[in-house]
Each structure stands twice: as C-alpha cells, then as structure tokens.
Image (cartoon, grey):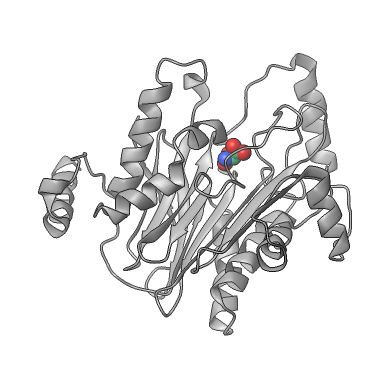
Amino acid sequence: MNKRRNFIKKSILGTVGASSLIKCDVPTNSNAQATYPRIISTWNHGLSANKEAWKNLMDGKNGISAVEAGVKISEADPKVRSVGYGGFPDREGIVTLDACIMDKNSNCGSVSFLQNIKHPISVARLVMEQTPHVMLSGKGALDFAISKGFEQEELLTKESKKDWIKWKEESKYKPVINIENHDTISMLLIDNNGDLFGACTTSGAAWKMHGRVGDSPIIGAGLFLDNEVGAAAATGLGEAVIRTSGSAMVVELMRQGHPPLEACKLIVDRISKIHRSGPDWDYLQVGFIAINKKGEYAGYSLKKGFDYAVCDNENQNSLLKADYSI
Ligand code: ASP
C-alpha cells in the first residue's frame, strides 16, 4: 500500500507542479480520470440518492433538479436516521433540519432549524430561486415553506422517539456521528457540460441542543462550489467543519492546484490539529468529498468508517471506502 501511496503521490504532484504545493501523504482512493457526468454522495445512503439523481439527469433534467431529487430520497427514508423524516431529534425530542443547495452560477439557498417539513432541500431551492436571500431559519423558514404549499408533518418516527427516550435515561451529551454509516447526505454533481451542482441535507447531530445549527446549511462549511474550480461537501461534526470553513477551503486548495484528495486531506489535517487536544477529540469525525472541473473526485475522513457513493458511466453506482488519517 505504501508503494501505491508513493506512486500516486508522485504522479499527482507531477501533474500539478509540486513546488507551489504543500506536500502531504496522498492516500489511495483518488481518481485521476477526467470524466463526466458524475455524481458523488456521502455515505451508503448516497447510493440510492445517486441512482435517483442519475435517472433525473439522464431524463434530461438539469443539475439542480437532479441533486434535489437525489437527496430527497434520503430525506424521505425513515431508515436513514440522520436526514429528514425519521432523523434523530434534539435533546427536547424535536427533529430540526438543515439543508442547502448551490448551482453552477454560485446561486445558493439554505434553510436551518426547520421543523415539520419533510423536504428541507426543496425549501432551500425555493429560497435560492424565489427570495432575495440565501438563508431562512426556524419559524421564518417554516412560514415560507407553508406559503409555498409545503405540508407540515410529524418527522419523529416511533423508532427515533424510542431511541430518544432511551438516550434521556442518561442524557449524556455527546453528538452521535458516524453512526451505522448513515449521516448527512451531501451530493456533488458534474453534468455533461462540466458544470457543477451540489446539495446537502441533514437532521444534524443527534441529541443536539435545541436551536443548534451545524455546518450543513452553511454555504462554505457544509457545501461549496466554484464552477471554475470544483465542489466540496462535508459530513461529520459540524462545529469542527464550521471552524475551518471546510468545504470552501477544500475548493480553494483545488484552485491552487491540489487534486481533490490532497485538498480534502489538508483540511482534515487542519481540523485534526485544531481539535487534537480539545474535549471533542474522542468522538470527532469529519469527512469530505470533492470533485474538480475535470470530474476527478475523492473522499477523505479523519477516522475510519466514512464511505461515499460514486455514480458515472464507468463505475455505475459504487460505494467506496474513503481513506483516512487515524
Ligand atoms: N454535519 C452534520 C452536523 O454537524 C452531521 C453529520 O454529518 O454527521 O449537523
């Protein structure tokens, strides 16, 4: 494996001009083939999300409709306990949702602390398309959704309520992340023209304080893209991602010439350095996915356990294990 690491390290540095780059140990799951269309999504529920997004794209829908349709699959699935309907609630037993979406022209929309709406990503899209704002939060986001015809529904399923009641017995506050490989869904798409789109949606860290908002609805933290460069998205402990403006930084590193894998790793290393002696170190997990304008992609996380789904004409729809630091 080390030999392979070194080989990839050399070839990647060779193509981008090693002298101007911060060197890092490049792991093995990078993809050097320039190809699109391509869709990558976080975690194993990314597979069904990718499938739907791909179908939409092949049916002639545009990139923004495809990513929206894709992540809606995870939002509606009660078995996905970290997104939308069936997501773990906060400490008060209330499911609160965060989501954002971004298109090739840097238009973006976001909702945070939204309750009782099954598809926050669709509300985020309408914030982008039908308001002069980027982000609506809490009651304002809910009122906006209702005004657009969204129906209110109970998002706390029996299973999630049961788990919450069990958690309350001890009420230890530790955000639950990296659980059963079901966390935030972030999706990045490069279409036939090489244009980029992204979406990110979550119920956030389980048992969070009421009112807590993570990285996922924050453009630049949970999701960022620049159509001249590439796109990146995050999963894991939102507080850690926000502190480094994680996704925006990954994109900026790609702008400087770093391949997606190196860019993700450099930001994970930065997060690791900041948190290593902090109180959240034992449960900290962060993972990033990234794709550049050539369609090269990667996923990388701090700790073992992060996987991501890739869908294109070559891979069909496959789940890849991301490489990791520790
Ligand atoms: N990033 C999400 C948050 O902090 C949670 C996750 O992806 O596990 O809200």
Q: Can see residue 317?
A: no
Which quadrant of the structure image shows residue 115? top right
Q: Residue at x 78, y 38 (%)?
A: 160
Quadrant of the drawing holding the C terminus: top left
Question: What x and y, as percent, mark residue 168?
Answer: 79, 20
Above or below 204: residue 106: below
Outermost residue on the bottom side: it is 60
- In the rendered structure, the answer to whether residue 138 lies left or right of residue 51 reads right
Nearest the viewer among 307 and 146 is: 146
Question: What x and y, as percent, mark residue 176?
Answer: 62, 30
Outermost residue on the front side: it is 132
Quadrant of the drawing holding the N terminus: top left
Above or below 247: residue 164: above
Above or below 114: residue 14: below
Please tell me in which quarter of the rendered image ligand 1 is found: top right
- In the rendered structure, the answer to whether residue 162 lies left or right of residue 189 reads right
Question: What x and y, as percent, mark residue 110?
Answer: 65, 53
Question: What x and y, as percent, mark residue 159?
Answer: 80, 39
Nearest the viewer among 282 and 209 is: 209
Above or below 89: residue 117: below
